[in-house]
């Protein structure tokens, strides 16, 4: 049989893979190290038992969107929810980008921004960050003026570098994108771990959207739920594109119940931020370059060993972190998710041995 072939742009794609290896200590995908708070799973189970299983879920996910919106002082109409923020970003690109249109990313950054752009047939322009991985505003202006992109991605805190874009940077890029007639998407998957959120810049006449996820802070990576905070006109367009009934009843329930546990979640974020400081200080005592981080992970580069060798040495000691070698400009770099103090101690012991 002559096998049908995928579109050329798909055939060229390597896909997005973070190896899932069985180890004792998993610090590779920026999940929460703790399960959800006490009582959460029981509360979800009780509501799931009452689902009308023979019926489609509520199509507009209205309660979930109202509750998410209320937690930011926004209305349900300003919230779009989907199966993980990756699906949110894909829907955004399907709607506002696609064939004949352009997106801009500033590398090194979250690989899915360019991957999903390509999957949706969007032409991707890869701008460069400055040496310290902050956004270089001259480079941003050059890229935006030259390419007049339909969608521009910022990621703050940036994955995998941990760098947070200051409010002035986001405002300046927003001005540039507004002048060129595009849409600025600020990916805040790790937004709860830092001090500034672009949410405060949202407005009905502002071409700005902010994506967030339940996968990290909310300890709900298994559920697959993310959302976009946006002007109402953006949300209305996205709803035309996303599949009908894409958000199942269980996901809607889990996301709504989680909002009853906001205080517990804030406490967790506080604990993780403290643990980040402790881990950062310990890493700085080792022969490593260590980047500052506003997220729940830290980027390092061993000074006297190859990143690959250190990554493998840790796997041999049953500790998994992320090898960033395939990211542009991150040869030799490794990303460590903040774990529990016990997990981080295991990592530190293993790392000390490997680097000895
Ligand atoms: C910056 C960033 N955005 C979005 C996502 C996707 O998260 P999810 O699809 O689990 O909501 C991730 C996951 O690692 C991420 O790092």
Image: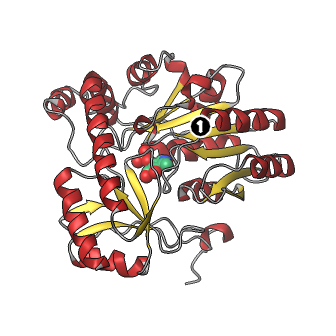
Task: Count the numbered circles shown.
Answer: 1
Q: Position of residue 137 (x, y in %)?
A: 74, 46
Q: Looking at the image, which residue is at 42% across and 24% down?
A: 68
Quadrant in which the N terminus is drawn: bottom right
Residue lying at the far right of the rendered structure: 146
Residue drawn 13% across and 29% down? 39
Q: In this view, does 314 lie above or below 71?
A: below
| Residue 293, placed above or below residue 312 | above
Up-down relation of residue 115 to residue 75 (above or below): below
Q: Residue at x 73, y 35 (%)?
A: 172
Examine the image and state in which quarter residue 231 appears: top right
Disc 1 designates what residue? Answer: 166
Q: Nearer the viewer, residue 223 or 320?
A: 320
Residue plotted at (58% across, 43% down):
91
List x then y, in percent, for residue 169.
Answer: 66, 38
In the image, 263 versus 303, the foreground residue is 303
Q: Give coordinates of residue 304: x percent, y percent.
A: 42, 80
Q: Residue at the far front: name it.
A: 285
């Amino acid at each position: 049989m002559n096998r049908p072939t995928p579109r050329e742009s798909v055939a060229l794609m390597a896909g997005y893979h973070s190896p899932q290896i069985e180890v004792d200590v998993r610090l590779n995908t920026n999940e929460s190290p703790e399960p959800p708070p006490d009582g959460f799973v029981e509360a979800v189970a009780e509501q799931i038992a009452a689902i009308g299983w023979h019926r489609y879920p509520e199509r507009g996910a209205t309660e979930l969107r109202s509750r998410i919106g209320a937690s930011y002082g926004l209305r349900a109409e300003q919230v779009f929810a989907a199966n993980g923020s990756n699906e949110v970003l894909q829907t955004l690109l399907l709607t506002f980008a696609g064939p004949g249109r352009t997106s801009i990313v500033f590398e090194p950054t979250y690989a899915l921004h360019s991957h999903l752009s390509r999957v949706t047939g969007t032409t991707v322009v890869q701008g460069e960050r400055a040496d310290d991985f902050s956004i270089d505003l001259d480079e941003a202006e050059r890229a935006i003026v030259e390419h007049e992109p339909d969608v521009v991605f910022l990621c703050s805190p940036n994955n995998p570098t941990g760098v947070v874009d200051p409010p002035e940077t986001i405002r300046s890029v927003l001005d540039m994108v507004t002048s060129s007639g595009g849409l600025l998407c600020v990916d805040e998957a790790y937004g709860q771990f830092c001090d500034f959120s672009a949410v405060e810049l949202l407005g009905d006449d502002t071409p700005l959207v902010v994506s967030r996820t339940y996968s990290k802070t909310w300890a709900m990576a298994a559920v697959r739920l993310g959302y976009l905070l946006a002007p109402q006109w953006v949300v209305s367009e996205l709803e035309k594109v996303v599949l009908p009934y894409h958000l199942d009843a269980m996901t809607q329930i889990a996301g709504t119940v989680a909002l009853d546990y906001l205080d517990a979640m804030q406490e967790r974020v506080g604990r993780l931020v403290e643990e980040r400081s402790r881990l950062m200080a310990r890493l700085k005592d080792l022969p490593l370059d260590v980047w500052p981080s506003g997220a729940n992970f830290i980027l390092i580069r061993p000074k006297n060993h190859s990143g690959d060798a250190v990554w493998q040495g840790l796997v041999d000691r049953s500790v998994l972190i992320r090898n960033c070698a395939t990211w542009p400009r991150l040869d030799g770099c490794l990303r460590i998710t903040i774990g529990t103090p016990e997990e981080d101690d295991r990592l530190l012991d293993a790392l000390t041995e490997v680097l000895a």
